[in-house]
Amino acid sequence: MIPYGRQSIGEDDIEAVEEVLRGGWLTQGPAVDQFERDLTAATGAAHAVAFANGTAALHAACAAAGLGPGDRVVTSPLTFAASANCARYVGADVGLVDIDPATWNIDLAGLPQDCDAAVVVHYAGLPVDLRELGYRPSVVIEDAAHAFGAKTPDGPVGNCAHSDMCCFSFHPVKTITTGEGGAVTTNSAVHAAALRTFRHHGIVANPSRGAWVYDIPSLGFNYRLTDIQAALGSSQLQKLDRFVARRNELASRYRELLAGSTVGLPPEAPDGFVHGRHLFPVVVESRDLVFAAMRQRGIGVQVHYVPIYALGAYADLGCSPADLPHTDALYRRLISLPMFPDLTEEDQDRVVTALLAVL
Ligand SMILES: *Cc1c(COP(=O)(O)O)cnc(C)c1O
């Protein structure tokens, strides 16, 4: 089976991990510090805080922003559940804003004036143009799990030019991997300090009263990344531009091979933007039949995503597909084709041949 996504691991990555294993420190330590410095260099943000996974990063960002009960956090319905779950973890309410059919991202013009925060997802790796925020909620968090290495006219996604915090995931299908892992970037020293405390049980040391003295003024979690993972992250980060360039190359090739067919192609990045190309979702009629036939031919297609309003945990939103018509119309016909840097052109040809035959 050709998967829809997978990691790309080289000897350099293996050596970087081995070096940590031969050293004296396994959990969060000097390699995490180094990875965080590498992340600030790659994104241009003032601070980077590494987390155990992308979901923990989103949870911590909501907590560091001070979101909680009574706050209304909006996000796109066309995303992985974590983009909405993070708001619920801190006791806030979730609201959904339909996608813009031209970008498949949240329609910024649809942000309700009474929302307190937005979790903005760069779907498939296409950056949301945050310069177009008309109404700006008091908190803007980017879910950039798909968009590491993507760029806007303001620079790399993660520089937080128009947001308070930006969250990344380093799951194996994402642009770079640490096995499991995530990070938050921010230009706020206050947010960075809150993120670090939240990651470490909420512990605040008070050495002036004794080296052992600490308090936990409010609960945190154990959301630390290990040095083993961070070493892999720093090694992978050196290949970020190559990974993103290869993904864009494969995307251009899909566009050429599918041109003139009935397959609907995903939105392109506008001038001045670089697409992150985490996914290559396309639009087909009879999606469910195409999905089954492709899987049967050994092509690991996937659907990204079952919309948030269709998940049992969000049934209480009382949202029907008709409330989010653009998301619903796209979701019914959406299917992701394999997209990862090590996908060969022969395998990509196999995917396209199978898809055209199935159709
Ligand atoms: C992968 C992903 C996450 C969560 O990341 P994990 O590292 O798997 O916890 C969050 N949001 C989106 C949009 C994702 O694709």
Image: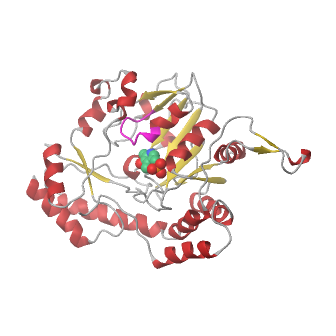
Residue under the image location 30 percent in, 65 percent down: 250
- Quarter residue 257 falls in: bottom left
Which region is colored magenta?
A: 75-83
Relative depth, front residue between 278 and 257? 278
Q: Is residue 96 left or right of residue 39?
A: left
Q: Where is residue 269 in the image (x, y as percent from the top left)?
A: 37, 52
Residue under the image location 42 percent in, 57 percent down: 174
Q: Is the magenta stretch mostly helix, strand or loop?
A: loop
**The magenta stretch spans residue 78:** yes
Residue 328 vs 342, above or below: the answer is: above
Q: Quadrant of the N terminus?
A: bottom left
Residue under the image location 34 percent in, 32 percent down: 311
Q: In this view, does 282 lie to the left or right of 356?
A: right
Residue under the image location 67 percent in, 44 percent down: 201
Q: Where is residue 93 in the image (x, y as percent from the top left)?
A: 50, 25
**Taking the image as drawn, is residue 179 in sight?**
yes
Q: In this view, does 337 lie to the left or right of 115?
A: left
